[in-house]
Image (cartoon, rainbow, N blue to C red):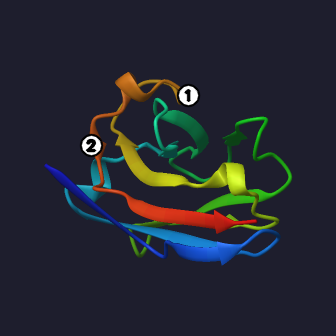
Amino acid sequence: QVQLVESGGGLVQAGGSLRLSCAASGRAFSINTMGWFRQPPGKEREFVAYITGSGANTHYADSVKGRFTISRDNAKNTVLLQMNGLKPEDTAVYHCAAKLSGAASTSDYSYDYWGQGTQVTVSS
């Protein structure tokens, strides 16, 4: 089992920044890819970014590319999402997810464990 806990959400004005953190526990050593997904109000969950086990490879949704940065600290079993230049359309509940095996993926169904989520609200 792997437990994931997100933190760092909040209310910010457009153009501002937030840093989300996801702490993994349990069998965290078995995690390969870590991802961030978000669910805007009234919409389906969507991919934001992922980072592979070594941290060597990252991938971003077009909507956040150049504004968001994903990173991980394997020694601390933590993955971060630095969000700059926030826009009102970034408002969503943000979830981190862990994928134990297989190739990195943007599909939420391929992830094995999920955190409860943290709310990010961007005001205009």
The outermost residue toward the right is: 66
Is residue 19 rendered to the left or right of residue 29?
A: right
At mark 1, the secondary structure is: loop
Residue 80: tell me if it is visible.
no
Q: Position of residue 8 (x, y in %)?
A: 48, 76
Type of residue at label 1? Thr
> Would you place residue 31 above or below residue 4 in this image?
above
Mark 2 neighbour density, 10 Å: few (under 14) some (14–19) many (20 or more): some
Residue 110: image location, x then y, percent: 38, 24
Is residue 102 shown above or below 48?
above
Q: Is residue 27 above or below residue 113?
A: below
Quarter of the image where one finds residue 68: bottom right
Q: CA distance from mark 2 to mark 1?
A: 14 Å
Residue at image point 45% right, 53% down: 93
Disc number at residue 113? 2
Q: Earlier in the sequence, mark 2 or mark 1?
A: 1
Q: Amino acid at mark 2?
A: Tyr
Q: Is 102 located above or below residue 36 in the figure?
A: above
Q: Nearer the viewer, residue 82 or 99?
A: 82
Name which residue lies at 75% across and 63% down.
Answer: 86
Quadrant (top left, top right, bottom left, bottom right) of the C terminus:
bottom right
Residue contact between numbered discs 2 and 1, judged by CB atoms under 8 Å: no
The local crowd at label 1, few if under 14, some if 14 to 19, many if 20 or more residues have their Cα within 10 Å, is some
Residue 21 visible to an observer of this rendering: yes
User: Which residue has dot 1 on it?
Assistant: 106
Residue lying at the far front of the rendered structure: 124
